[in-house]
Structures are given as C-alpha cells and as structure tokens.
Amino acid sequence: MKGLILLKNPALWTMLIAAAVLFSIQPAAYGQDFKTIIWVSNANTVAVEPAYDDEGWIFLLEAEGYAIQRENRTMIGSPLTADQIATLESGDLIIFSRANSSGDYIDPVGWNSLTSPLLLISAYLPRFSRWQWFDTSELTDDGGAPIMHVEDPSHPIFAGITLDANNDVEVLDPTVASGQTSTPNQTTAGSAATILATRADLGYVWIVYWPQNEFFNDTGDQIAGGNRLLFNGGTREGSSFPWGVYNFTAEGEQMFLNAVAWMLGESVDVEKTTPVPENYALLTNYPNPFNPETTVHFAVPHKGHVSVTIFNSLGQEIITLVDAEYQPGVYDVQWNGLDRFGNQVQSGIYISRLESENLVKSNKMLLVR
C-alpha cells in the first residue's frame, strides 16, 4: 500500500482538486508504479521562498505521483543501526538531500554498502573525509549560478533538455540565493564512474554515476553497494542563507525528474501533452511574497483577447503586463516591481487583474523590499 503515503498529503489533495477543475487530468509521466522514495534530510527549517529549504524538491516529486517517506534527522550517527538500515532499504530509491552538518553522517561503510539505489544531492557527503566517493575533500562554493556542460547528451537524464551549441544548459535559478551550489574540486571520478555533466567554467564534476559493486575511486577501498548517482543541486551549505533551497530552472527540474526515473529503472518519457484549460483563470503568482520580481500565470480556454494589469491597494493602475490576443493554453508573465514609467514601486499589497471577454479575475500579491 505504498501509494497511500501520497494520498494522505492534504496539500497534494488540494492541488489535485484544483487541477481537476481547471484541466482534464493527464496521466503522470513518472511514478508509474507508485514507487516509494526514502527522502533523507537534515535541512534547516528557515522560511524562504519558494518553500522551506528542500520542501520544493519533495513537492515536485509528489506532484509526479511518487510516494515520499520523509526521514528528517533520523539517520544521524555512526555506524548506522540495523533499524536505520532497514528503513533505508525499505523503499525503491534513497534520495539524500542536504545536511546541515555532513559530519553527522560519517559512516562510509554503512552508507556505501546499502543495496538500494541512492541519489545524492549534496556535494559535501561524497568527499574523502565523509563517504570517500572522491579522493579529495575540496569543494567550490563560489557565488553565482554555474552553467552545466553535458558530457553525453544522448543519456536519458538529458531527454527533452534544450542545450546550446556547446552542450551547455542553465539548470540553477540565479534569482534564488544567487543560484549557488557546491561541486567537488574534481575533474575525474575513478575508472568505474561515468561523468555525465560538469561545470562549464571549471570542468569539475556535476552529475556522476557509479554502478553497483564498483569502486568509487581508484585510490580508495569503498565500493558501491547499489547504483549511485551524484546530482549536485540546491543552494550550497553555508551560514548566510538556508541550505538546500529548491532553485532549479525548468530545464533543471526536468533533468532531476529524469534522473529519479532513470535511477528507479522507469522509462524516461518527456513527451507531455499540453492540456487545454476549460476556463479562463488567473493562477496564484509565484513567489508570493516576492522581491524583486514574481511570475503571474494565467489560462486561456480559447482564442481571445486577454489583458493582465497590476494595481496598487488604492485601485490605481501601476502597469499593464499583457494586452494581446492569445491562443488556448497556459501562459506566464513576469512583473519586476516597476511601474509603467520604469520606476520602482514601494513595498505593499498589489492586485493582478485578468480581463477577457466579460470576465474579470483578481489576485493579491505582496511585494517586500
């Protein structure tokens, strides 16, 4: 009854009901067999948009139909106990998110000997001083969102991903904690490893795969008990902002879902039909509250003229974001907190208003500078 874990999530029920009203429900591309993912995390609980630390990752997977069993701070200690190992092995895939202190998990033999496949998001744990996947403990934590270089575009993890002429792609959103993440200072990963993606600027490994029963690196003695995938993501570990915050671009999000499906042995099918909305809708802007910009989403059920305008709390028009004819579909438009003259508006409550035919819909948004 693994699927029941998903159905007990009130937030997901709300989302599914809303989707049923707006769209004709389409079958999910992933989570075909209600696979269970053991989500291990030691993340902070500091409020930050778009979610509390790594919650965004979990919401993404739940929306795709996976059952998520959360294990927050339950796997601390060395060595792993028999009960901890049994819990970790009870799912179809282990995803280790972020660690406030990777030193809480120094048990390379225990973690590496697990036979379940494991997808690791944090670059801190595979260091030589932790799980010994690499023969170095050095990391790069510089600011800004690094660009990913894809080494093998034909791999299923990159299905549906749009690459530039150099096989590069932006997978981290620079507007979320500057898009920072951590990568090992390593350009190699042992003779048994397959390096799937690197940092375009430095050549350091980003996505690396080790098959079951293979050595992680050529100088150590740690062996992968099951398939292992390092997929660096989320904001880097540090004291100036929350760690593990969900900060993918649309391309990064697709890539992460592909990686999860591939590690579970599922087919990676990114052919998605675009549902036609049944009604006009002005969806909640995201993020909200926001600073300095937010995205307004709206749905158009048939060809027609649509306008989206921003007003202040006094009803005064600030700026018109959209005023054009649209085909059926779901669209988004960004507002950068400027009025129609290019001036920065003050913090406060603003109203987005959609008008089409004889329909008017409005939503509140909060700008906090």
Image: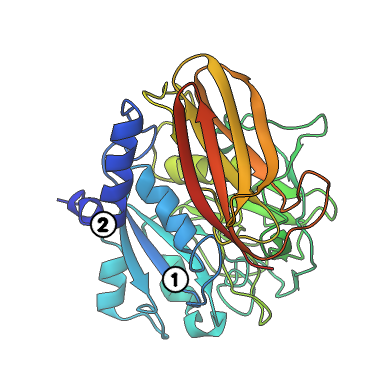
Q: Position of residue 21 (x, y in %)?
A: 30, 33
- Give the residue type at disc 1: Ser
Camera-side mark, 2 or 1: 2
- Residue at 62 percent across and 39 percent down: it is 309
Q: Position of residue 284 (x, y in %)?
A: 48, 47
**Residue 20 sits in which quadrant?**
top left
Could you tell whether 364 is left or right of 342 in the image? left
Residue 191 seen in this snapshot: no
Identity of the residue furthest to the top in this view: 303
**Residue 222 sits in which quadrant?**
bottom right
Element assignment for label 1: strand
Vertical relation: 50 (above or below) 308: below
- Residue at 51 percent across and 73 percent down: it is 47
Q: Quadrant of the C terminus?
A: bottom right
Label 2 neighbour load within 10 Å: few <14, some 14-19, many 20+ = few
Could you tell whether 192 is left or right of 93 in the image? right
Residue 75 seen in this snapshot: yes
| Residue hosting label 1 | 41
Q: Give the numbered dot on residue 9.
A: 2
Q: Nearer the viewer, residue 111 or 237?
A: 237
- Give the residue type at disc 2: Asn
Could you tell whether 35 is left or right of 338 in the image? left
Vertical relation: 183 (above or below) 132: above
- Residue at 27 percent across and 41 percent down: it is 17
